[in-house]
Amino acid sequence: MAEDPTSDPTADAADPDGQPDGAATDPATDPAVDTARWPVVVVVIDESVEGERIDAVTAALDDVLRRRERIGFVFDYARGPMEAQQRISMWLAERVDALRVLVPAAVTVVAPERLDHIRSMIDTGVFTMPFETWATATVDDGVAWVAERIPPPT
C-alpha cells in the first residue's frame, strides 16, 4: 500500500503529483465529491459508486485533504451500496490524523426511516470519529449543521 500523502497535515513536503502541499488543484476529480459549498464538502455515495469508481472517489477526497484547509464533510449514504460505505469508512480510518486536524464536523445522510436508529448509535458512542458527527435525512440539513461548526478562517 502506498504511503498516505495526507498523514501529516502540517508537512511541507511535495505531494506525489509534484505539487506542494496546499497547492491549488481541482479536488472535484469525481462528481461524487462536490466542493461547490466549500468549506463543506458533500460526498454523494449512490448506486453509481461501486468497484473502481470508489477508488476515484477516495482519490478525490485525498485531493481535498491536500488543500490543508479546515473543512467539514457531508456523506450522503442514503442510496449507496454497502461496499462503497465500507470503503469510505476505511478511508476515514486510514486518515484519522489528518482528519483530526482539518475536520471539525461531519454528517452522515441516511434514509429517513434509519435516522433515529443511526442517531441513537451516535449518541451511545457506537460510531466514534475524530470530529463531531451527526446524522440527517437531507444533504441541505447536513450542510447547515456542518457549516455551523467550521471555524472562520484566520
Image: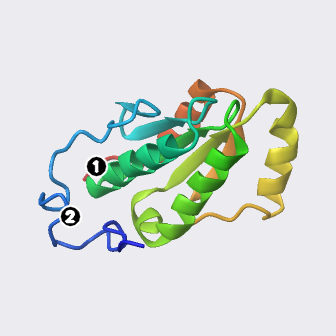
| Rendered view: 140 above or below 42 | above
Q: Is residue 153 above or below residue 26?
A: below
| Label of residue 153 in the image | 1
Count the labels in the image: 2
Q: Is residue 125 left or right of residue 75?
A: right
Q: Which mark is residue 114?
A: none
At mark 2, the secondary structure is loop
Q: Within 10 Å of the Cα at label 1, are there few (<14), some (14-19), or many (20+) other Cα atoms?
A: few
Spot occupied by residue 71 in the image (x, y as percentages of width and height): 40, 48
- Mark 2: give few (<14), some (14-19) or many (20+) Cα within 10 Å: few
Nearer the observer, 37 or 46: 46
> Quadrant of residue 49 in the image?
top right
Q: Is residue 26 left or right of residue 129?
A: left
SS under mark 1:
loop
Residue found at x 85% / y 51%: 120
User: Which label was assigned to residue 16?
Assistant: 2
**Where is residue 79 shown, x and y percent of the image?**
69, 30
Q: Is residue 106 above or below residue 29?
A: below
Identified at 53% across, 51% down, the residue is 105
Q: Position of residue 114 (x, y in %)?
A: 84, 37
- Most extreme residue toward the front is 51
Front residue of 152/54: it is 54
Does residue 96 lie above or below 152 as drawn?
below
What color scheme is it? rainbow
Nearest the viewer among 44 and 22 is: 44
> Residue 27 falls in which quadrant of the image?
top left
At label 2, the amino acid type is Pro
Residue type, mark 1 in image = Pro
Residue name at image x 84 percent, y 61 percent? 124
Residue 89 seen in the figure: yes
* Closer-to-camera residue (5/109): 5
Choose mark 2 or mark 1, whichever is in front. 2
